[in-house]
Amino acid sequence: MPNTKSAARALRRSERRRLRNRMWRSMARTFIKKARKLMEAGDLEAAARVIGDAISTLDRAAAKGAIHKNNAARRKSRLMKRFNALVKARLQQGQEQST
């Protein structure tokens, strides 16, 4: 328990910030999970839309200080790396079947 009025105010502020940051982190994780699930299912068009939402949410979370900007960049990079590998594999399959 806080001992002073200012400590009590700081506690209330930090709790509000914690909840706000948790919301942004949770939203980002949710979009990333949805994108991964769609990629595993092979629905790349829907995955591309969800990846856009995930990237936007990660950028906003980083801008608001919920996560570090390098953390957001790393997550976006890993997500796009996985997506691009699937797209490349899909294109190679299409070329092999057409020849």
Image (cartoon, rainbow, N blue to C red):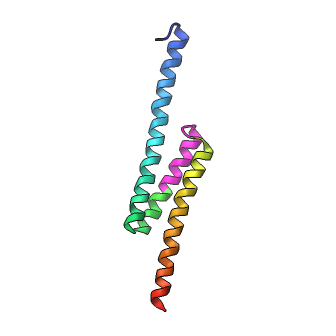
Q: Residue at x 58, y 46 (%)?
A: 71
User: Where does residue 22 sit, x and y in percent of width and height?
Assistant: 46, 36
User: Where does residue 29 sit, x and y in percent of width and height?
Assistant: 45, 47
Can residue 62 be found in the magenta stretch?
yes
Residue, far bottom: 99
In the displayed structure image, the side of residue 36 where residue 4 appears, left or right = right
User: Where does residue 43 sit, x and y in percent of width and height?
Assistant: 39, 68
Q: Residue at x 58, y 57 (%)?
A: 77
Residue, far left: 41
| 96 versus 61 height, above or below | below
Q: Residue at x 62, y 46 (%)?
A: 70
| 9 versus 18 height, above or below | above
Report the magenta residues as a range: 53-67
User: Where does residue 36 sit, x and y in percent of width and height?
Assistant: 43, 58
Q: Residue at x 45, y 87 (%)?
A: 97
Residue, far right: 70
Nearer-the-camera pick, 92 or 51:
92
Q: How many marks?
A: 0
| 32 versus 95 height, above or below | above
| 45 versus 95 height, above or below | above
Which SS does the magenta portion mostly show? helix
Can residue 72 be found in the magenta stretch?
no
Nearer-the-camera pick, 97 or 27:
97
